[in-house]
């Protein structure tokens, strides 16, 4: 099982605010994204990742996001197995993001 890293919401926000070019991959379903979008994220639902893998750059730092961090951890591990060396899971998902990094993001 490959190791994946994690990033806390406040650390990710600080990096984004600094202008770091981090690729955000949101693996939630469209209905979830409609309620609480993650600004600037690319959206590929978890179930579509294997068939859309070629849309992703294995050399680019990628932070995977979901609601609570469970699905995104699974996708991050899958990406690591597929050769993505710089993949991180957003700890606590968009829910933690809305509580600690951006309170304007709706919770659901």
Image (spheres, rainbow, N blue to C red):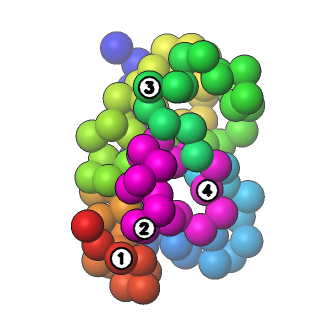
Whole-number angstrom distance, CA of label 1 to CA of label 3: 24 Å
Residue 82 in sight in this render: yes
Dot 1 and dot 2 residues touching (CB under 8 Å): yes
Q: Quadrant of residue 18?
A: bottom right
Q: Which residue is mark 1?
A: 106
How far apart marks 3 and 4 lie (CA) works out to 17 Å
Foreground disc of the pair 3, 4: 3
Q: Residues within 10 Å of mark 1 (few under 14, many from 20)?
A: some
The C terminus lies in quadrant = bottom left
Position of 30 relative to 55 (above/below)? below
Residue visible at 55% across and 75% down in the picture: 14
Q: Estimate the spatial distance between the alpha carbons at disc 1 and disc 4, rounded to whole Å.
A: 16 Å
- Residue holding disc 4: 41
Give the percent coordinates (x, y) of residue 7: 42, 54
Q: Residue most toward the bottom?
A: 104
Label 1: state its secondary structure: loop
According to the picture, the residue beneath numbered tag 2 turns out to be 36
Residue 18 among those drawn in magenta: no
Q: Which residue is mark 3?
A: 47
Counting residues from the start of the chain, the first of labels 1 and 2 encountered is: 2
Q: Is residue 37 magenta?
A: yes
Task: Identify the mark nearer the N-term, 3 or 4.
Answer: 4
Q: Quadrant of the N terminus?
A: top left
**Could you say which quadrant of the image residue 50 lies in?**
top right
**Circles 3 and 4: CB atoms closer than 8 Å:** no
The local secondary structure at tag 2 comes to loop
Instruction: Point out the frontmost of discs 2 and 4.
Output: 2
Nearer-N-terminus badge (1/3): 3
């Amino acid at each position: 099982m490959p190791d994946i890293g994690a990033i806390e919401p406040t650390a990710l926000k600080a990096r984004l605010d600094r202008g770091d070019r981090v690729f955000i991959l949101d693996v939630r379903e469209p209905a979830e994204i409609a309620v609480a979008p993650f600004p600037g994220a690319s959206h590929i639902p978890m179930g579509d990742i294997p068939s859309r893998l070629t849309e992703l750059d294995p050399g680019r730092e990628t932070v995977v996001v979901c609601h609570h961090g469970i699905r995104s951890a699974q996708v991050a591990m899958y990406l690591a197995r597929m050769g993505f060396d710089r993949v991180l899971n957003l700890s606590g998902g968009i829910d933690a993001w809305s509580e600690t990094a951006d309170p304007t993001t709706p919770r659901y």
